[in-house]
Image (cartoon, grey):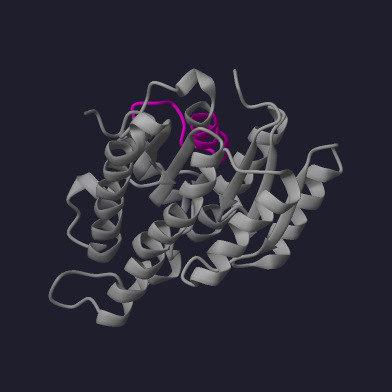
């Protein structure tokens, strides 16, 4: 892809799954990456594995709900690699899904925690990344969304609300700073078989999802990483303010 070599990207939530695959894809394209994750050990392991191949990669502890931690992640990219060209915000409170029910029964602490991670944290990343992107004459923000934002499920209320709010955030950013060279988009994955999903989901559940997927297989982290890399690249420079479904054809909009 054009325009990724020698660029600097932050992966906020890059210690495993989609974030890890994105870090790998971007470094394969010649970019430098700073990988932040709540599990610092995973972030360091991913960075070390990439560095062993000759890539420029830094791993560090990161909590998207703490503003100082978000600022530290951005500053690490600037201090270590000289600037920032894009950020992939990929953090989510997956553990909260177990208690994320409906509008009558969802525990308010679950609702509040989900929005703190999935929406407020994304605002913090946006707020601190934008000034550095503007110093470079523009850049790209890519958020990980979900088909849950527009499917209208009977459960997972907090998760869906947070992802819909994220769509409002990216459209605001595209409208406010688009003329300054800022692009803000989201990728909405379908069922992606990450290591965690592989252990959490039964074969029957996977088969059920595959049955409504207009593709012969379920998703893999590399599928989402490819779209994130495209949106970060010069090849994707005329895409702004969009939510792009990468789900094997489950949703058609």
Q: Residue at x 30, y 49 (%)?
A: 169
At which x and y percent is residue 149? 25, 49
Q: Residue at x 82, y 44 (%)?
A: 51
Residue most toward the left?
A: 104
Q: Residue at x 18, y 78 (%)?
A: 105
Q: How many numbered discs? A: 0
At which x and y percent is residue 230? 51, 26
In the image, residue 128 above or below residue 88: below
Judged left or right of residue 156, residue 13 is right
Judged left or right of residue 126, residue 55 is right
Question: Residue 101 is drawn in which quadrant?
Answer: bottom left
Q: Which residue is drawn at 54% across and 69% down?
A: 63
In the image, residue 70 above or below residue 251: below
Residue 37 visible in the displayed image: no
Q: Is residue 219 magenta?
A: yes
Question: Residue 179 is drawn in which quadrant?
Answer: top left
Q: Is residue 226 magenta?
A: yes
Q: Range of the magenta residues?
A: 214-229
At which x and y percent is residue 204? 41, 50
Judged left or right of residue 41, residue 145 is left
In front here: 48 or 216? 48
Residue 143 visible in the displayed image: yes
In front here: 241 or 218? 241
At which x and y percent is residue 134? 49, 40
In front here: 196 or 171? 171
Quadrant of the frame with the C terminus? top left
Quadrant of the frame with the N terminus? top right
In front here: 245 or 29? 29
Judged left or right of residue 82, residue 37 is left
């Amino acid at each position: 892809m054009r325009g990724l070599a020698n660029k600097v990207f932050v992966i906020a939530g890059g210690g495993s799954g989609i974030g890890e695959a994105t870090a790998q894809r971007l470094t394969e394209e010649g970019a430098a990456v700073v990988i932040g994750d709540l599990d610092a050990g995973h972030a360091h392991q991913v960075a070390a594995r990439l560095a062993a191949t000759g890539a420029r990669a830094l791993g560090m502890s990161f909590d998207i709900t703490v503003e100082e931690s978000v600022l530290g992640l951005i500053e690490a990219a600037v201090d270590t690699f000289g600037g920032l060209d894009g950020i992939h915000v990929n953090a989510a409170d997956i553990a909260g899904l177990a208690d994320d029910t409906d509008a009558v029964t969802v525990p308010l602490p679950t609702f509040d925690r989900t929005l703190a991670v999935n929406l407020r944290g994304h605002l913090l990343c946006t707020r601190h990344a934008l000034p550095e992107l503007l110093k470079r004459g523009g850049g790209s923000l890519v958020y990980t969304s979900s088909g849950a934002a527009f499917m209208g499920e009977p459960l997972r209320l907090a998760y869906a609300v947070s992802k819909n709010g994220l769509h409002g955030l990216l459209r605001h950013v595209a409208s406010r700073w688009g003329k300054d060279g800022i692009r803000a988009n989201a990728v909405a994955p379908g069922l992606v078989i990450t290591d965690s999903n592989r252990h959490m989901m039964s074969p029957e559940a996977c088969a059920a999802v595959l049955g409504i997927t207009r593709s012969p297989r379920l998703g893999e982290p590399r599928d989402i990483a490819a779209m994130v890399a495209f949106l970060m690249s010069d090849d994707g420079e005329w895409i702004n303010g969009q939510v792009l479904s990468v789900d094997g054809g489950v949703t058609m909009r």
